[in-house]
Amino acid sequence: MHWFYLTAAVSAEVIGTTLMKFLVSADQLALGTLAALTMIALAYLFLGKATLRIPVALANAFWEGLGMILIALVSLQLLGEAMSLLQGVGIGVAIVGIAVLNYGHYQQEHAE
């Protein structure tokens, strides 16, 4: 269930950021800000639930990394924004970092 909460936290962050961009672009600054704040608050609520069973470092890396990747994909697909090669490399490095943290956590659990 803890991974469900972590996935819900990532989803809430991505939805909030995307709604903010759409609403602010439609001259709805206050509504966009309110949507973002609401979804980020929900994301932190889910993140807090996830960290009851997942170490904070792993949960935060997963939340931030996957959130960044998904927001980048949404911005490319839905918002028509561009990404440079260097930004793509940065996303690749983030993926490697998340994998290394996850592997380290796995090793630590099995050593105990």
Image: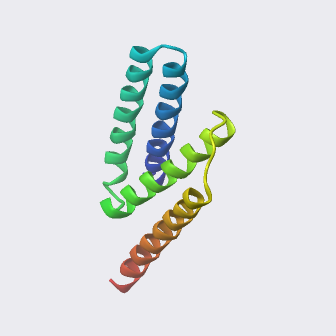
- Residue 111: horizontal and vertical position, in percent? 36, 86
Residue 40 location (% of width, % of height): 38, 35
Q: How is the image coloured?
A: rainbow
Judge whether 78 appears above or below 3 on screen.
above
Q: Is residue 81 above or below residue 107?
A: above
Q: Residue shown at 38%/26% (left/top)?
A: 38
Q: Is residue 59 above or below residue 49?
A: below
Q: Nearer the viewer, residue 10 or 46?
A: 10
Left of 19 or right of it: where is 54?
left
Picture coordinates of residue 1 (x, y %)? Answer: 46, 51
Residue 47 lies, in percent from the top left, at: 36, 47
Q: Specify whether 110 is left or right of 88.
A: left
Residue at figure coordinates x 59%, y 59% from the top left: 88
The residue that appears at 48% across and 34% down in the rendered structure is 17
Q: Is residue 94 visible?
A: yes
Q: Which quadrant of the rendered structure holds the C terminus?
A: bottom left
In the rendered view, would you say 34 is above or below 77?
A: above
Q: Closer to the camera, 103 or 5?
A: 103
Seen from the viewer's position, the closer of residues 53 and 46 is: 46
Query: Looking at this rendering, what residue extends furthest in the bottom direction?
Result: 111
Q: Residue at x 31, y 54 (%)?
A: 52
Residue 55 is at least partly visible in this image: no
